[in-house]
Amino acid sequence: MMRKLFIAATLLFWLAVLGFWVTDAWLPVPPAVAVEKRYTLQELARHNQPNDCWMAIDGMVYDFSTYLPQHPSEPSVMLPWCGKEATQAFLTKTKGRPHSSYASQLLPTYRIGRLGAVDESPSGN
Amino acid sequence: MSVMRWRNPIIAPAFALALPLAAVWWSFPEGLPLWRSIAIVTAWAGSALLVANLALVVREPHLARLLGGLEPAYLWHHRSGLTAYLLLLCHPLALAVDGWLEAPQLAWQTLAPWTQSWPVWLGWAALLLLMLGLATTFALRLPYRRWRAFHYALGLGVVLGLTHVYVLLGGVELILVLIALAGLALGWRLIASDLGVASYPYRVTQVARPATGMIEVNLAPSAAALAVAPGQFVLLACGDGVRFRGCGEYHPFTVTSVAADGQVKLAIKALGPCTQRIQTIEPGVQVRLQGPFGTFLREASTAPQLWIAGGVGITPFIAALRAHPCAQPTTLIYLFRNAADAAFLDELNAYAQTDPQFELRSVETGKAPVDFPGLLQQVSQLAQREVNLCGPAPLVQALMPHLLQLGVDPNAIHSERFDFR
């Protein structure tokens, strides 16, 4: 009984993983996220609401509007940084501690572009 | 070896479930999307269940007694291990579904290891080790040593899984508690039990051969003696002798005699490579014992007894007969394949002649199927008897329905089997 349950669950798991992979391969490639899109600090500052929350960290601009409800801490911790350059806040979570590597790993998911005018980009030099 | 009826059948499952329930209560997410919440709950419940699972195989005599014996502890070790695995399989899938609902492309990105970093790889490595370890656990006919090696992979899987959580979340209180408990349980099992630090040194003083492929060793304590009783079993690991080379691993053996001066006798049948090698053990060899374990024949009862032994399953009964005369009318049905396999038969016949309370029915079965109903119907007052069964699992399983059919109270049936993984 336990053996059968193990085999069935393992097979179903790999089938589900395979399903996600096949679906990904068949789905149209999403339009290139405006990775290289440039935003100024003024533009950033306009997105300073809980439901429209952008931040700049280490030269990149992130849209955390959908992430905000998932953040482990109280909203009051993260909200004040919406619309701002938040590198220091990110690197000093509490008592000078940086965020975990998992947090760093989450960042690309929310990246929408770079900070700075177009003519400041390195490729433009 | 195992005892089927436990003193308290609730303790072992309660022990297994308490930690995951506490973990879910502590970590239950609020205000997160459904599938992300499922991912979090399954991760914590699975991780905590794995830690409880480790604690169930610590194999420490006091803990084993608290849990009602090693049998329920091992049964719930198996159940909790598989349940934890099922929960942990749900964890990445739930994360993928959560990603899918945001953007379908995110689902595969959540799962594909090459889009992730090493903290997530740790999680994948843990899950794959659990998968491998469980696959080998369920593999039929895997030699014991190979099975044990793959079982260590499961322990490593737990360690990697907890590290995965620690790296992702940092030092939150619950993960620190789980890591501490897992370290304690694994450390105790590996150091005290597997390496034998908590064992008692004994010396082989005599070796007898009561049947083909079976020896009976007399062991004298080199220091303190175990407080063992007839019906119980111990774990034995053998050292080296002049010509004998022990295999160094612990195997369970039922005691066949317990002397007042602390000496014990164990019957060892050649059932695998290690027990085969022990057949050549010689006096003077140092051995180590752990235990005692088991509650077989330990329940005080005034009811007349029916003992049924199959082959090497005679060992707890011979220990009881050697310890003291029968207190109640006792019938022993002793089933063996042929005369050469019938260990202690002469001694049992002698007890039958000298102890008026003891009746022996020895049955040479050969290869023909045994007429269990016929055998049992010859036993007087069968329905009033307390029945103790000891022998191979197929024998115990085959006898059970006949005993119940003939009116024996299910609560009056106790059984000890000879499979112990």
Image (cartoon, grey):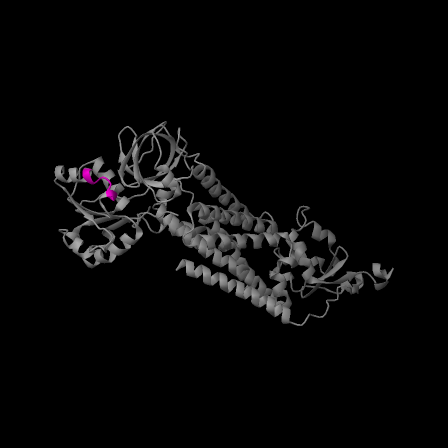
At 42% from the left and 48% from the top, the residue drawn is B143
Depicted B29 relative to depicted B212: above or below: below
For this view, does A30 lie left or right of residue B328? right
Q: Position of residue B235 (x, y in %)?
A: 37, 39
For this view, does B209 lie left or right of residue B329? right
For this view, does A80 lie left or right of residue B51? right
Q: Position of residue B32 (x, y in %)?
A: 57, 62
At 63% from the left and 62% from the top, the residue drawn is B109
Depicted B313 relative to depicted A2: above or below: above
Q: Is residue B368 visible?
A: yes
Q: Which residues are magenta?
A: B340-346
Q: Nearer the viewer, residue B28 or B283?
A: B283
At 63% from the left and 71% from the top, the residue drawn is A26
Q: Position of residue B302 (x, y in %)?
A: 18, 44
Q: Nearer the viewer, residue A35 or B208?
A: B208
Depicted B220 relative to depicted B45: above or below: above
Q: How many marks?
A: 0
Q: Nearer the viewer, residue B414 or B210?
A: B210
Indicate the quadrant where residue B332 lies.
top left
Indicate the quadrant where residue B279 lies.
top left
B406 in the magenta segment: no
Q: Position of residue B312 (x, y in %)?
A: 28, 44
Q: Is residue B31 visible?
A: no
